[in-house]
Amino acid sequence: MAFNVALYQRSGNIWAMTERGSKSLVRNARSLWIGNSGLGWSDGGLDLEFEETALPWPGHRFLPRRFTGRIRLEPEFLHLKPFNLDADGRHVWWPLVPQARLKVECDLLPRGGWEGEAYHDLNFGSRPLESDFISWDWARGRAGDKKTIVLYDAKMRKGEECTLGLAFSAGRDAETIELPPRTSLQRGAWGIRGNIHCDEAARPSRSRRLEDTPFYTRSLVETTLGGERLDMVHETLDCVRLANPFVRMMLPFRMPRNTRR
């Protein structure tokens, strides 16, 4: 198990994902702690505290470095309905907080942190992702009418596909939106090709790469839906790559192990 912290900045990203043993886990109905990092609900919001080690990475830092911080997420509204991603209900996606305000504090960030818009969801299931998925593309952005737009496209090993286009706003159920065809994005450095829905009269573009790995990419993407240009956070997961033994041998470079508490 691991507590993943990923903070992005122009001067160098901060990444930590240390795998820990079961003795590091402390949890109850309202909180979860793994080692010295944890999260829990209080006063109507979600609080996260972290004390981790940022990994060395070319272009960011040459040596590991300890860092600490906290995050406060205050929902504008909640969405209480999870979505099944497969016909058997083995994999579930829950966009619990489609819109929120966020305050980030960290000793490695310029001026100590920042505040802004936020979103919180969770995925859970009864089987490993690579057992049932071939790949997925996901994207989230804020539309001009104060709605949060989420796109989810998943391909399963059984041949089925799940396509979701949803608009979330306060005081209303999630609305299904009509989606244009998917358009390919430029391949990442490791050959991962993502896709995103985009009006046929426009072209999507990547404005910034955040993560670029052998099986996963995360980017800031511009696309057009229904004539409106949207800035979205986009991710692609290639589960065929994830299951590759060679790729699994590379995981400790990004996910070191610490069996002590």
Image (tube, rainbow, N blue to C red):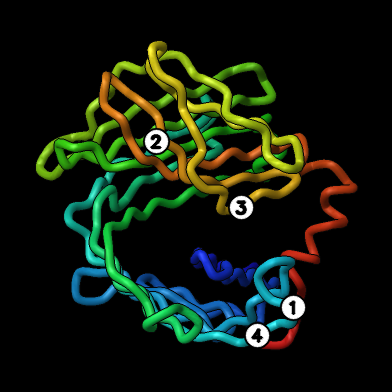
The image position of residue 129, as x and y in percent, is: 65, 42
Please tell me the numbered disc located at residue 83: 2
Amino acid type of the residue that numbered disc 4 sits on in the rendered structure: Arg
Amino acid type at mark 1: Phe
In this rendering, the label closer to the viewer, 1 or 2:
1
Q: Secondary structure at mark 1?
A: loop
- The answer to whether residue 242 is left or right of residue 71 is right
Please say if 125 is above or below 11: above
Tag 1 or tag 3, which sits nearer the N-term?
A: 1
Local SS, label 3: strand
CA gap, disc 3 to disc 2? 26 Å
Amino acid at dot 2: Phe
Residue 244 quadrant: top right
The residue singled out by tag 4 in the image is 65
Q: Mark 3 or mark 2: which is in front? A: 3
Q: Is residue 20 visible?
A: no
Q: Say which residue label 1 marks.
A: 62
Q: Which residue is mark 3?
A: 211
The image quadrant where one finds the C terminus is: bottom right
- Identify which residue, 67 or 242, lies in the foreground: 67
Lower position in the chain sequence, tag 1 or tag 2: 1
For residue 67, above or below residue 94: below
